[in-house]
Amino acid sequence: MSLGFRAVQWNRQKLIYDGILLAVVALYIGGFAAIYWWLHPPKNLPDAIDIWIRAFGTCAFLMLTVILSIGPLARLNRRFLPLLYNRRHFGVLTFFVAALHVWFMLDWYMVQNNLPNLATELTTWSDYGKFIGFPFKVLGIAALLVLFLMAATSHDFWLTFLTPRIWKALHMALYIAYGLVVMHVALGIMQYERTPLIPLMLVGGFATVAALHLMTGWRERSIDNGITASDEGWIAVGPPRSIPDKGARIIAAPGGERIAVFRDGDQIGALTNLCAHQNGPLGEGRIVDGCIICPWHGYEYRLADGCAPAPFTEKLATYRARINYGIVEVDPRPLPPGTPAAITCPP
Ligand code: HEM
Ligand code: FES
């Protein structure tokens, strides 16, 4: 673990994040239930329980939308970076909110002594071929299982055990969960409730996530297009001053691998853009006292050789850099992790 790892253990910042998160969720669920109760006073106990099903269900959907938007938002605007900081707790809380949605749904059946009906609904195989009348709850169950898997493997133990690459690929399943929830609502409540609020929530949420990802993708495309490789395969980055001081320019190797080319005064160093922690975009970080600080959770790496400062042991792949006719060039073939490769620009 790097020095910055301390930042993701219990500390004041994290407690504030979690406190605000819990307060917003409680306010949403309480506010939703109060307004709904006032607009449609429940006639019986199942009606009252239904309000909680809806409050927790919509809350989980909106939380999923926010989680999937945080990544691209933070890449488009650094002001959103603090939201990334404790995204794992956000994800775990989303699982619990969705689980409570399901708990109230079970309660709805139980207070009517009707639980066997739920089992019948889920096992009436002929309904699986229908569009209207599809057992939409099964889509919710699949989404909840994915959320459970994400929450259960969110601890750093799993990150180390599975390696960041596999862990991140696994956590991409969140997109599948989101799709399942969209279908769960579109084939479920949207079929029998005529309020425009439900399609508005679904389309609004889905469009926001899709638009933010497209915008980030578009921005990253310009990274791929702007670079030319020389005859020997070195990539031209630009004059040293085109790299922001204490910051980086991100370039793409011919295979698509991102390389972060940093400048600290007159020192230039190129490293993989993938942080060893959770593959965060290192090139969007800043240099403090000769160390690059990952923007996501604060892991640190020396610019000189890509090694985390002692007592930590992470090492990143570095790349050879040179100045050719006043232009910084980078050899896109990675050096073994931890190889000193930074250079000093001539005055
Ligand atoms: C990740 C998991 C889940 C999420 C995010 C989720 C989300 C939602 C949302 C947003 C609604 C629409 C609420 C409204 O606008 O009124 C809904 C409705 C519903 N969900 Fe889920 N759901 C999940 C899992 C489940 C599961 C596992 C079940 C059952 C096994 C379930 C049963 C229902 C039922 C019965 C309704 C309709 C409620 C009504 O008629 O008032 N959900 N869900
Ligand atoms: S510190 Fe977590 S991804 Fe870099």
Image: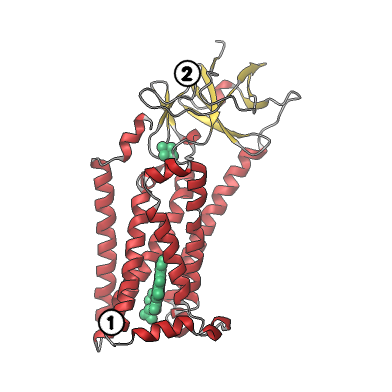
Mark 1 or mark 2, earlier in chain: 1
Q: Who's the residue at 35% across and 56% down the image? A: 92
Give the percent coordinates (x, y) of residue 16: 25, 47
User: What amino acid type is highlighted by mark number 1?
Assistant: Leu
Q: Secondary structure at mark 1?
A: helix
Residue highlighted by disc 1:
39
Q: Who's the residue at 36% across and 61% down the image? A: 95
Give the percent coordinates (x, y) of residue 184: 47, 73
Give the position of the N terminus as an image quadrant.
Answer: top left
Q: Secondary structure at mark 2?
A: loop
Which color mode does the image show? Answer: secondary structure
Does residue 65 appear left or right of residue 54 in this picture? right
Give the percent coordinates (x, y) of residue 254: 68, 35
> Which quadrant of the figure has residue 12?
top left
User: What amino acid type is highlighted by mark number 2?
Assistant: Gly
Please identify the residue farthest to the right as the structure is shown: 231
Relative to 312, residue 70 above or below: below
Residue highlighted by disc 2:
265
Relative to 48, residue 142 above or below: above
